[in-house]
Image (tube, rainbow, N blue to C red):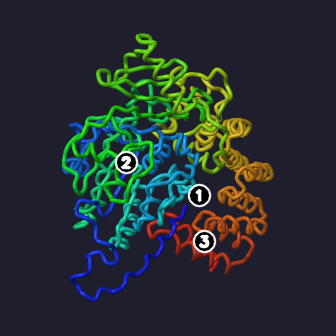
Amino acid sequence: MRLVPASIAALAAACTLAASCSRYSGTPAVRADIARNLLIVTIDTLRADRVGAYGYARARTPTLDGIAARGVRFDRAFATAPITLTSHASLMTGRYPPGHGGRHNGIGVNEVPTLAGRLEAAGFATGAFVGAFPLDHRFGLDKGFQAYGDRMPRGPEGRPANERTGREVVDEALAWLAEHRAQRFFLWVHLFEPHAPYGDPGDKRPVEARYDDEVAEADRQVGRLVGSLGADAASTLTVVASDHGEAFGEHGEIGHSIFVYDTTLRVPLILAGPSIEAGTVGADVSLADVAPTVATLLGVGTFDADGLDLGAVLRGSTPAPRELYAESFAPLLDFGWSALRSVRADGLKYIAAPSPELYDTRTDPAESKNLVTESAQRTASFVARVDGISSAELEPSVAVDSEAAGRLQALGYTSGRPQNASPRADPKDRRDLVARLAQVTSGELSGPALESTLRRILEIDPQNPQAHLRLGYVLADSNRCAEAEPHFRSAIAARTPTADAHLGLAGCLAGARKFDKAADALRDGLALEPDNPVVVANQGVVLSDAGKPLSAIPLLQRALALDPDFHQARFNLALAFARTGQAASAAAEAQELLRRLPPDAPQRSEVRRLLAAVQ
C-alpha cells in the first residue's frame, strides 16, 4: 500500500532559441482543440440528485456546479455496478465487468488495457491517489500509473485504516502535481467522502443532513485540485464522476452494493475542457464510455472498449440506440443469493432475478411498477440480451486474501460467506436482513442500538459470522468478555477469513490472565494471516504480560519488520526491553517512537514516561 515511486522523466535537450521552445519544457506542443492534460475526480457514493447542477436546492457544491456550468453535464449517466472497485474498473478500462473481471470488491482486475496504460505509453506522467482500501493497488487499477498513492493510516488498535480523508488524498495529489506540471499529465483523485459513516453519527442530526455535509467537503477538496491548476486549467480535460449512488431506504435498501435500482446506479458525470461547449446531455450513457471518450479528446487515438466514444454527443449529435449493462454479484459472492444483472434499452430497464423486473424508467424513474407480466415477448427479448452479456453464475476464481476480506468487511462490502444454495434466493426477499447489516456496517449505530441490531440479525440468521464477530467486540469493549467469548468462538467456527475473531478472543483471555489460551488463539489466527503484524505483535504482548518479555522481543521485532510504522508494537518492544533490564535498547526504541509519532499524538506523554523510567 505504499506509494509507487514515479519514474523519472528523461531530460529534454536545452533550447537554444526562445522562439523554438514550448512553455512546457521537453513536451511536444498540443493542438489547441486537443486537451493537453487529464484530471479525473471520482467521488465515492455520490448521488447525482445531491449536486446543485443536478437540481438539488440545498446543495453546497459550488465547485462541481462551476465545472458543470462550463462543461457538459450528463443527466442520465449510469454505473456498471453499485460497487467501488467494479465501477472504477469500468471507468478506467471502458469494459463492462465481464470484460475486466473485477466483479466485486477484492476481486482483481484482469490484464485488460487501461486508460492509464494508454496515456503512459503516449508520454503522459500518470499519478493516482485514492481514499479507500477497495482501490488498493493489489486489485489491479494501478496498471499504467507511475505513482499510486493508496497508503492508509493505522487505527488506534494498530490495524491499518480502510479509508483516509479527502484532504489527505488531495495533499498528496497536489505534491505530485507540483513535480509533473511540465509534462502532459493524467491525474486521478478518488475521494471517499461521502461514503458512510457520514460525519459524526453522534451529533444526532438526520443521516441525509450529514451526508450533505460530506458532499460539501468533497466539493471543497475538488476546489483545491481545480484551483491548483491555475493557467493549466484551460488546457486540462476535467472529468468528475461518482462510482455509484447511495440508498436511504428506497426499495428497502440502506447503503449500496446489493440492488441494481437507479438509486445506486445513476451517477453524476461532468466533462469540461478544451473544445467542449457548455450543455446538457439527456441520453443514457455509461461510465464505460469515459475511457474511449477521453482518449479521443486527448488525441491519443481510439480505445478498444465496450463503452462508446461520446465525442459526437458532446458536439450535439444524438447517440444511436443501444443497450447499457449493469450488475451486482455481491448477493452471490457475499451470501450465496442470486446475482442481479440488468440491461436498459429503448427507455426500459430489465433486472434479471428469480422474480424478474421490468420498468419504464422514463415514466417511472422510481422503478415502482413492474411491467414483466404485461409483455412476455418484450421480457423474453431482455432475457436473451442480458444472458448474452453475462451468466448469472461465475467461474471459480482466485479467492480474496484474508486481510483484504477483513478490511472490506469492515467497510460493509462483503460478509465473506458464499453459499451453494439452489435455487438461489432473490435478494428482494432478504431486504430486512440486508438493511440491518447495512445499518451495522455503515457505522451509524453505536452502544445499545448497535447491540440490539446485531442480536436481531442473529435471530434472523443465527450463523451469521460477521454479526457474531461484531457483537463479540461490542460486548468485549463494554467489559463483558464472558458474553463476548461465545460469539468470537462462533465466528471462528464459521471460518471467518480473517484473524479478527482470534484477536478478540485472545484479548478476552489475556484480560482474564489466561495467557496460554490467549497464545493458542493467536497461533490459530496467525495460521490464517501469517504476515499480519497485529497478530504477531499481540503474540509478543501476551508473552511479555505473562512474565516472558525476553521471548516477546523477537515477535515484536518481527511485527516492526512487517510494518515499521506500527507504533503500538514499538512501544511494547520498548516495554519488553525495559522488563528484561535492557535499558539502553528500551530508550532507543522509545526515542525512535517519539521521532515517528506526530507532534500532537496523545501517546507521546506515555512514551516520555517510559523513556524517563529507563534513562
At numbered mark 2, what does the secondary structure look like: helix, strand or loop?
helix
Which label number is shown at residue 90?
A: none
At numbered mark 3, what does the secondary structure look like: helix, strand or loop?
helix
For the residue pair 270 and 66, the one nearer the viewer reads as 270
Q: Earlier in the sequence, mark 3 or mark 1?
A: 1
- On the image, the x and y values in percent for residue 538 come to 69, 57
- On the image, the x and y values in percent for residue 438 come to 50, 34
Circle 1 packing at 10 Å, graded few (<14), some (14-19), many (20+), is some
Q: Is residue 198 visible?
A: no
* Label 3 close to label 2 by CB (< 8 Å): no
The amino acid type found where label 1 is placed reads Gly
Q: Earlier in the sequence, mark 1 or mark 2?
A: 1
| Residue 552 versus residue 293 in the image, above or below | below
For the residue pair 453 and 389, the one nearer the viewer reads as 389
In this rendering, the label closer to the viewer, 1 or 2 = 2
* Label 1 close to label 2 by CB (< 8 Å): no
Left or right, residue 483 beside residue 178: right
Q: Which residue is mark 2?
A: 290
Q: Which residue is mark 1?
A: 158
- Alpha carbon distance from label 3 to label 2: 56 Å
Q: Is residue 528 visible?
A: yes
Quarter containing the N terminus: bottom right
At numbered mark 1, what does the secondary structure look like: helix, strand or loop?
loop
Which label number is shown at residue 610?
A: 3
Left or right, residue 252 beside residue 212: right
- Alpha carbon distance from label 3 to label 1: 19 Å
Q: Residue at x 41, y 59 (%)?
A: 169
The amino acid type found where label 2 is placed reads Val
Left or right, residue 376 beside residue 476: left
